[in-house]
Image (cartoon, rainbow, N blue to C red):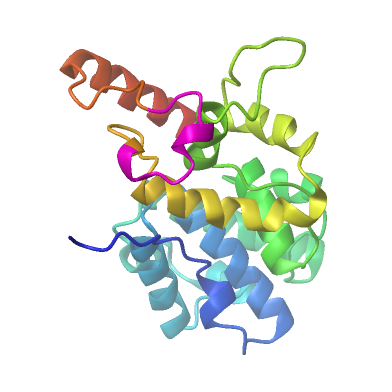
Amino acid sequence: MKTLEPVYSLGVDETDSSLPPKERRFAVLLSALLSSLTKDKVADGALQRLLQNGLHTAEAIDKADEATIKDLIYPVAFYTRKACNMKKIAKICLTKYDGDIPSSLDELLALPGIGPKMANMVMTLGWFNVQGICVDTHVHRICNRLGWVTQPGTKQKTSSPEQTREALQRWLPKEEWVRINPLLVGFGQTICTPLRPRCGMCTVSEYCPSAFKESSTSSSKSKKSESSSLRKLER
């Protein structure tokens, strides 16, 4: 049987630690932007093409033609919009931060195309300052399946990754905030998948209130509904 392995990647944090600090931080920001709704290998490939062409600083992105950026980052999801946002972010970083990236969560969230998950990832990997948990659809889904999170004052599941982040941070020790994302992302990609979770292979199924409750023969209607919900959560 083929071995199942997590495919989670930290991108620039693993491959480009030799960059000067300011350049590395900007590359981390680009990596976060590229990763949205895109598989790790595709996003990492796009980042490497930018690095190979010297387009990993605010100055270089600001001077580059937007069409060139689009060509280099294709086929990441929404590459046209991301290329446009990269140009806008570069201009802001040059104007307000002397070519560096913002050093606070609120300022990162004010950048075009940067959401809570990306901002927390940039704070952690760029500034080595853990401000929050990076919650994507894998973390959101698994935390709800395990019954780890609920909406405030209720027993209802959280309805968005941001609600999950807030609920998870209320009880999870801060020293675990960095580790929880890669742990659950890898688990979600290989075992606790969005559709047809492999409960029979799961070593924690006896502790999971959702174990074996999602049929492997779900109707096409239910599959379509879950896929639609995941897309909405990822936006």
The quarter of the picture where residue 91 lies is bottom right
Is 150 left or right of 55, judged from the image as shown?
A: right
Q: Position of residue 5 (x, y in %)?
A: 35, 62
Q: Nearest the camera: 152 or 2?
A: 2
Give the answer, above or below, for where 112 lies relative to 152: below
Q: Position of residue 77 (x, y in %)?
A: 35, 48
Q: Nearest the camera: 159 or 33?
A: 159
Q: Position of residue 108 (x, y in %)?
A: 72, 51
Residue that appears at 81% across and 60% down: 103
Task: State the residue lying farthest toward the bottom.
Answer: 18
Q: Nearest the camera: 147 or 118?
A: 147
Residue that appears at 40% across and 29% down: 230
The quarter of the picture where residue 53 lies is bottom left
Q: Position of residue 25 (x, y in %)?
A: 68, 71
Q: Does the stretch in magenta take in 153?
A: no
Can residue 92 be seen? Answer: no
Please identify the quadrant where the N terminus is shown.
bottom left
Q: Nearest the camera: 228 or 71?
A: 228
Give the answer, above or below, for where 112 lies relative to 225: below
Task: State the residue lying farthest toward the front.
Answer: 206
Can residue 167 be seen? Answer: yes
The quarter of the picture where residue 144 lies is top right
Task: Give, as a single range, the part of the protein colored magenta.
Answer: 200-211
Give the answer, above or below, for where 96 lies relative to 100: above
Is 2 left or right of 72, judged from the image as shown?
A: left
Is 10 left or right of 2, judged from the image as shown?
A: right
Give the answer, above or below, for where 149 lies relative to 69: above
Residue that appears at 58% across and 32% down: 161
Q: Does the stretch in magenta take in 210?
A: yes
